[in-house]
Image (cartoon, rainbow, N blue to C red):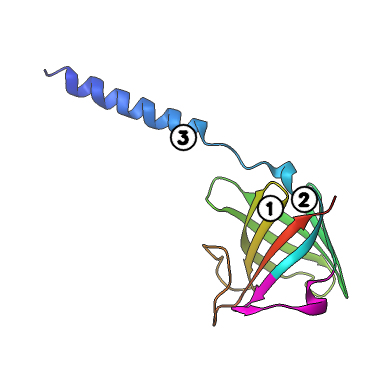
Amino acid sequence: MKQVLPVSIVLAVCVSVMADEKKPDFDRAALEGKWTIVSGEKSGDKIEGKALEGVITFTKDTIVIKAEETHEMKFKLDAKVSPVAITMTGEAGPAKDLTAEGIIEVKGDEMKLTYAMPGEKRPTEFGSKKGDKSLSFVLKRMK
C-alpha cells in the first residue's frame, strides 16, 4: 500500500507532462498572406464604411495595412498563452514607434484580432466593449 501512493503520483505527473506536450502549437504560417476586414469594433461601437476598406498583408514578422493610410508594423507572438498574444510595433505610418498588445486567432480562412490602444493592457477575450480602449476585427483571407 505504501508503494501505491508514490507510483500513482509519478503516473499523474507523467500524464500531465504528456498532455502539455500534445498541446498543438500555433501555426504562425497560417497568418501569412493577404486579408480583408469583414467587421470591426472600436470601444464597443461598430466600425463601418471606409474604415473597413483596405488590404492587410501578414508576412513572417510584419504587418502592412494599405488603406487610406499605410501602416507598417513588426509583430511578435506568444503562442504559449491562450489566446495567442500578439505585440505590434509601428515601423512606418501614423503608428510609428507605438506598441499595441493584443490577441489573435486563425481558424481556416478567418482571423480574429483584438488589441488595446498603445499604453493599455492586453485584452483577454475577443471583441470590444463600451468604455474599453480596444479595437477588434474579423478578417477573411483573400483568395
Q: Nearer the viewer, residue 7 or 68?
A: 68
**Amino acid type shown at disc 2:** Asp
Tell me the quarter of the image containing the N terminus.
Answer: top left
- The relative height of residue 25 versus residue 126 in the rendered view (above or below) is above
- The residue where tag 3 is placed is 20
Cβ atoms under marks 2 and 1 closer than 8 Å: yes
Q: Residues within 10 Å of mark 3 (few under 14, many from 20)?
A: few
The x, y position of residue 83, in whole percent, is 55, 53
> Taking 32 as reference, is 130 left or right?
left
User: Depth-wise, is mark 3 or mark 1 nearer the camera?
Assistant: 3
- The relative height of residue 7 versus residue 85 in the rendered view (above or below) is above
**Amino acid type shown at disc 3:** Asp
Q: Earlier in the sequence, mark 2 or mark 1?
A: 2
Q: For residue 138, what is the image quadrant?
A: bottom right
Where residue 61 is drawn, which disc sits there? 2
SS at circle 3: helix
Q: Earlier in the sequence, mark 3 or mark 1?
A: 3
Q: Residues within 10 Å of mark 1 (few under 14, many from 20)?
A: some
Q: For residue 39, what is the image quadrant?
A: bottom right
Magenta segment: 40-53
Separation of residues labelled 2 and 1 (CA atoms): 7 Å
- The residue where tag 1 is placed is 76
